[in-house]
Amino acid sequence: MSAADTTLTADPVVAEPAAATPRDPLPRAGWRVVAAKELGDHLTSVRFVVLLVVLGLAAAIPLYFAADQIRSIAPQASGFSAVFLALFTLGSQDISVLRVYEFVGIVAPLLGLAFAFDAVNGERSEGTLPRLLAQPIHRDDVINGKFAAGMAVIGLVLVVVVGFIAGFGMLRLGIVPHGNEVLRLLAWVIITFLYVGVWLAFGLLLSVLVRRAATAALIGFGIWLLITIFGQLITTLVNGILAPAADATPDAILANAQIQQFITRLLPSTLYRETSVVLLNPSVNQISAPTSIGQVQQAQQQIQSLFSLDQSFLLVWPQVVALVFLLVVCFAAAYVAFMRQEVRA
Amino acid sequence: MRRAKPAVRRAATDDDAVIRTRRLTKRYGTLTAVDNLDLVVHRGEIFGLLGQNGAGKTTTILMLLGLTEPSSGEARVMGLDPEREPRLVKRRVGYLPDAVGFYGGLSGRQNLRYTANLNGLRRDVAEHAIADVLEQVGLTDRADDRVDTYSRGMRQRLGIADALVKTPDLLILDEPTTAIDPLGVVEILELLRRLVNERGLAIMLSSHLLTQVQSVCDRIGIFAAGRLVGQGTVDELAATFGDGTATIEVGLELPTPADRSRAQAALGSLSGVTEVNPPAKDGDPWQVVVRPASGEGRVRQEILVVAVDQSLRLTTLRPVVPSLDDIYRLAVTRTAA
Ligand SMILES: Nc1ncnc2c1ncn2[C@@H]1O[C@H](COP(=O)(O)OP(=O)(O)O)[C@@H](O)[C@H]1O
Ligand SMILES: [Mg+2]
């Protein structure tokens, strides 16, 4: 037994009342201080400029083709509603992927990853995390603030890019959006925001779990590549394996189609693309594989008519819910992992 | 039970404790990083937590700040429980982590501003406090340069400034002098002493460097393998962990060998003196070893008397303060045994 033990174990720890010196109150919203600092960092960072340029280009290239097509139909377009949305949905007739929403869908994940992959591990390796956590804020203020700043900068980039496209349409092509189109566009921007948010939360998760920022970036980039470039390839492959035999009954074929669709929808990129198509095209009235022969016939007989926004929304709400679910799951995982981590590396 | 004395003396002023732990313990799996720690740090003192790497110093500090949960036992910092009220504790305690880092792209002043904002300081209060602490650590000239361009020593001083921005009542510094050149160390230690004198705050610092702790700390806690093996002033620790002897340095002018043997006999005849070691080189002091150590003061006076009686010319007469090195070595080996 050491000397210290013998001298101190006898007296109990007396809870001394907190000194009554007047002090500033505890800061109430630590996450806002963190978010403000992070946002300042983002806006002055090179990556912000680079991403703005990349996303701008991703929008501008298909826009060029879309403008061409819109000009060619403009003379007979008087009865054609939703011309404005065509800016986002039309593209090259030869290359189907050359459309604004497709391109944005490809590049947007990078936007999310870029503003999150080094959020926590960066603080760790710089040795700023213990100092930050030793300030009188809640521990989750750090991760909440970083997420909020990421969402803010993403929102800003999206508004700038969509504003650029819309401005181009109005000024150069002279087409003006109708009220309905504005609403659809707004809905699409929100969905895109949500989709990028999924990737931001995923990047945040990587930044908590992976100790080195470079490794986290590489993993994030790899998964993006896998999903965006090879995603369809992989689902095609899987579906090829599952393909029904030539002599299958119609019911078997239908069931198989549903399975294939389910597999495709495991990918967030598919969820986003399907939602975009419906929201930006008032004429799209179906995204699911028919579930009965009756539906197939019905679809064939259906007269081409335009859908209202809430009708369109009814079509995609499962996709939207799935996106929200993914975002919540990723962020919650990052949150829990961060709260349980040791302060020391 | 010699150690009981200082504790009793302090018992009367126990409410000035800024840190008090009771059986504080932290286990990582089977490893006990901090083992039943009982520690008291008082207002207005510099307390040194001394221990080798892996002794549990950082773990202790993290528990005091509520940054990691104790496995058992309790801690009070400024009378608050860091586990339940970490924000109140952190509002009043400035902390310099080991290997402190800053946002390299921001200036020193911007880094401090962020800390001030996180502490909820009003803008004018913050700017004033920042200018103040930058002045105090001598970084005013470089305050608006990017931290990227700072030297290791400057970062360390910025770290102390950062811990001071919130006007704390207690500073906890983890290895504040590690990886700093000797001159920088002296600077930092002087700064700490000045802070205690000017601001009246308490400081707890950890270190594995004995001499530095000895030179600046009022009291010291010796840490080994998660256990506090001793706590007190250097003298108190010496009394506990010394080998029970004290040494007196006696400088004598002895021109002839006859003088020398006379001196040897005279010093050796004093009661309590167990050894008289003549110097290896002329002019160096003699070493007189006294047992028990408590007889050191009496023997010193008797040497004065003897020197006059024997008409020996005395040049110096002083007790040798035991080096913390020895104490530390003894403390660790004795507790291990
Ligand atoms: N997160 C952790 N998990 C497991 N063991 C740890 C952890 N953190 C520290 N330790 C161990 O606890 C002991 C004390 O470490 P530490 O408090 O850092 O010592 P010091 O600061 O005195 O060098 C060491 O043996 C260290 O390996
Ligand atoms: Mg340490």
Image (tube, helix red, strand yellow):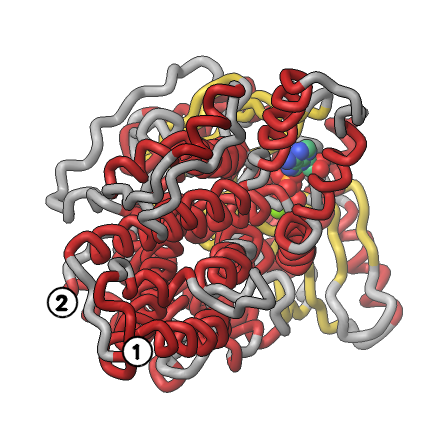
Q: Which residue is mark 1?
A: A168
Compared to A82, does B52 lie above or below?
Answer: above
Compared to B107, does B40 lie above or below?
Answer: above
Residue in the foreground of this view, choosing between A311 and B44: A311
Look at label 1 and name its amino acid: Phe
On the image, the x and y values in percent for residue B65 come to 42, 38
Q: Quadrant of residue A327?
A: top left
Asked if marks 2 and 1 touch (Cβ < 8 Å), the reply is: no
**Residues beneath discs 2 and 1 located on the same chain:** no
On the image, the x and y values in percent for residue B121 come to 19, 56
Q: Residue furthest left?
A: A22
Compared to A132, does A308 lie above or below?
Answer: above
Badge 1: few (under 14), some or many (20 or more) residues near its Cα, within 10 Å? some
Look at label 2 and name its amino acid: Asp
Residue in the foreground of this view, choosing between A2 and B61: B61
Q: Which residue is mark 2?
A: B124
Q: Secondary structure at mark 1?
A: helix
Residue in the foreground of this view, choosing between A82 and A10: A82
Quadrant location of the C terminus of chain B?
Answer: top right
Residue in view at x 14 percent, y 43 percent: A21
Q: Residue furthest front?
A: A301
Q: Nearer the viewer, mark 2 or mark 1?
A: 1
